[in-house]
């Protein structure tokens, strides 16, 4: 019987993945999976060269769920959960230590018809190893915040339709590649009353490499700093 408990513990951990399930705009919950491209299950992407890295599995084609208007300069929140529920379990389970990032990409026409390929993505948020002494990660804060994190849509972004790509890079088994578990959720939005900035853009997939120190990293050896993949945040 001594072997039963470790076996069950590892089985539970393997199943305890998560998805991005809610978008909030200026404090208003838009509803479960509304305006989001919903993947078939809560598994992570681990191949950083796959087109699944863009907007998760089946994420290259638009969702019939529609597109929500967000004024430039607004604060949005992305909310993540393991399963089909907001209560009764931790939003992000304990094993998943890692970074949280948000990107935006402007669609040539509509967000719903945009596949997000090419050098189109701008990073607007990144949070990683917050406290090396306590080994507190961005994912710990998301978990204790009911699965939510905030990001301000820069006021200088040009108006138009966009994909907003939330990402959690979980690093608990990332010491060899493939290992890092990348969780992705994409929202379809229309940014109104924007500005005229021309922010730097990267490709997803394309920019992340298996050898990036933010992708292949042992976080259990008193890590003192962490460099997330995808370069610096553009602050607008
Ligand atoms: C996640 O947050 C809840 C409170 O919302 C807390 O009870 C739990 O310990 C946290 N889990 C981890 C693994 O930190
Ligand atoms: Cu997982």
Image (spheres, grey):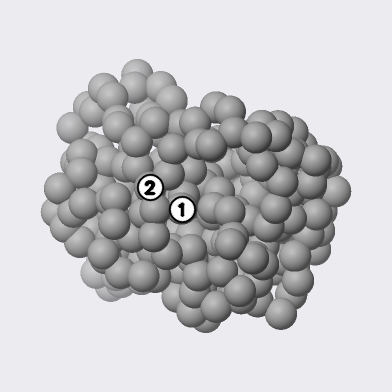
Q: In this view, does 191 lie to the left or right of 132?
A: right
Residue at the image point whose x is 41% and y is 22% from the top: 131
Discs 1, 2 touching: Cβ within 8 Å:
no
Q: What element carries label 2?
A: strand
Residue 142 position (above or below residue 32):
above
Answer few, some or many: residues within 10 Å of disc 1's Cα (few below 14, many 20 plus, some between 14 and 19).
some
Answer few, some or many: residues within 10 Å of disc 2's Cα (few below 14, many 20 plus, some between 14 and 19).
some
Residue at the image point whose x is 43% and y is 44% from the top: 201
Residue at the image point whose x is 39% and y is 31% from the top: 232
Q: Earlier in the sequence, mark 1 or mark 2?
A: 1
User: Can you identify the residue that label 1 sits on?
Assistant: 120
Q: Nearer the viewer, residue 212 or 146?
A: 212
Q: Nearer the viewer, residue 210 or 120?
A: 120
Residue 48 position in % (x across, y down): 28, 60
Residue 200 position (above or below residue 179):
above
Q: Distance between the residues labelled 1 and 2?
A: 6 Å
| Mark identifier at residue 202 | 2
Residue 71 position in % (x across, y down): 80, 42
For the question of whether residue 16 can be seen, the reply is no
Residue at the image point whose x is 51% and y is 47% from the top: 103
Q: In this view, does 214 lie to the left or right of 149?
A: left
Q: Is residue 53 left or right of residue 224?
A: right
Dividing the picture into quarters, in which one does residue 181 lie? bottom left
Q: Which residue lies furthest to the top in this view?
A: 133
For the question of whether residue 158 can be seen, the reply is yes
Dividing the picture into quarters, in which one does residue 65 lie? bottom right
Q: What element carries label 1?
A: strand
Residue 182 position in % (x across, y down): 38, 57
Q: Residue furthest right?
A: 28
Q: In this view, does 97 lie to the left or right of 114?
A: left
Residue 3 position (above or below residue 172):
below
């Amino acid at each position: 019987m001594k072997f039963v408990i470790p076996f069950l513990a590892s089985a539970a951990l393997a199943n305890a993945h998560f998805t991005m399930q809610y978008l909030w705009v200026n404090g208003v919950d838009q509803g479960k999976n509304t305006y989001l491209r919903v993947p078939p299950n809560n598994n992570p992407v681990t191949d950083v060269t796959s087109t699944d890295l863009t907007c998760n599995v089946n994420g290259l084609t638009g969702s019939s769920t529609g597109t929500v208007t967000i004024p430039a300069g607004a604060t949005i929140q992305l909310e993540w959960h393991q399963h089909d529920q907001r209560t009764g379990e931790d939003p992000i389970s304990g094993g998943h230590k890692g970074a949280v990032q948000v990107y935006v990409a402007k669609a040539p026409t509509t967000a719903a018809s945009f596949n997000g390929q090419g050098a189109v993505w701008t990073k607007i948020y990144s949070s990683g190893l917050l406290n090396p002494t306590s080994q507190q990660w961005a994912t710990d804060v998301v978990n204790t915040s009911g699965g939510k994190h905030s990001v301000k849509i820069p006021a200088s972004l040009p108006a138009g339709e966009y994909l907003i790509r939330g990402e959690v890079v979980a690093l608990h088994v990332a010491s060899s590649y493939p290992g890092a578990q990348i969780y992705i959720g994409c929202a379809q939005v229309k940014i109104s009353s924007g500005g005229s900035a021309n922010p730097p853009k990267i490709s997803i997939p394309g920019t992340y490499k298996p050898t990036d120190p933010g992708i292949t990293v042992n976080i259990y050896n008193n890590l003192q700093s962490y460099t997330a993949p995808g370069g610096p945040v553009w602050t607008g």
